[in-house]
Amino acid sequence: FHSANTFDPNANPALQGGTEGATMRFRPESSDGPNRGLDVAVRRLGNFISTHPWAENISIADLWTKAATSAIKVTGGPDIPVESGRLDFPTQQGERNIQVPPNGRVTSPAMNLSQLRANFRRMGFSDKEMVVLSGAHTLGQAHRNISNHEGRWTQDNTQFNNSYFKNLINE
């Protein structure tokens, strides 16, 4: 989600962001506050490629996307088809990082409602779609040393279900 959350269809093509390019490996995107701690997942998926020779034919961007959809499926969510073909940008482009989106595009826990709406509108999402994507908080948890937040958002954070939304309404 964090790599996709940088997408801006109105930006200069070199800075549109999104999963294409797997740019979260590079600064400034890797240093954006909400991305803090994601270097662990980036490193683990990189290790996967280096230890599975057949995976060398898969772009890092495709691997990240497939890993995300696989995690949803194995936790009880739907099977989301993923088409291959995303490209990896091999390196940063000098000091200007012309292919890496700037910081500030990733949704932050500190954003108020109007900031959240503006962020999701930039990517073309409605309020309904924004809420649906926020349901990803059903899985996993926050770690204070990484995000300044602590704990799970749901009772069973290993099952894909609608408990996040139930918590929003009932708690």
Image (cartoon, helix red, strand yellow):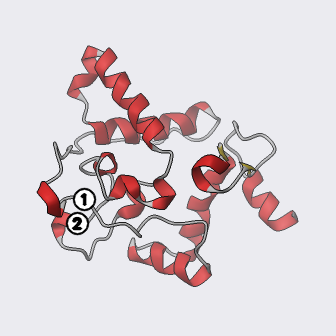
Residue located beneath label 1 in the image: 100
Q: Quadrant of the C terminus?
A: bottom right
Relative to residue 11, is residue 86 depicted above or below?
A: above
Q: Amino acid at mark 2?
A: Leu
Give percent across and percent down for residue 166. 80, 59
Q: Residue 79 versus residue 44: which sits nearer the camera? A: 44
Q: Residue 33 versus residue 137: which sits nearer the camera? A: 33
Q: What SS does tag 1 mark?
A: loop
Which residue lies at the image location 58% right of the left edge and 49% below the top edge? Answer: 146
Q: Is residue 158 left or right of residue 48?
A: right
Relative to residue 99, is residue 39 depicted above or below?
A: above
Q: Amino acid at mark 1?
A: Val
Mark 2 Cα shell of 10 Å, populated few (<14), some (14-19), many (≥20): some
Residue contact between numbered discs 2 and 1, judged by CB atoms under 8 Å: yes
Q: Is residue 90 left or right of residue 2?
A: left
Give percent across and percent down for residue 67. 44, 35
* Residue at the right extreme, as displayed: 170
Residue located beneath label 2 in the image: 15
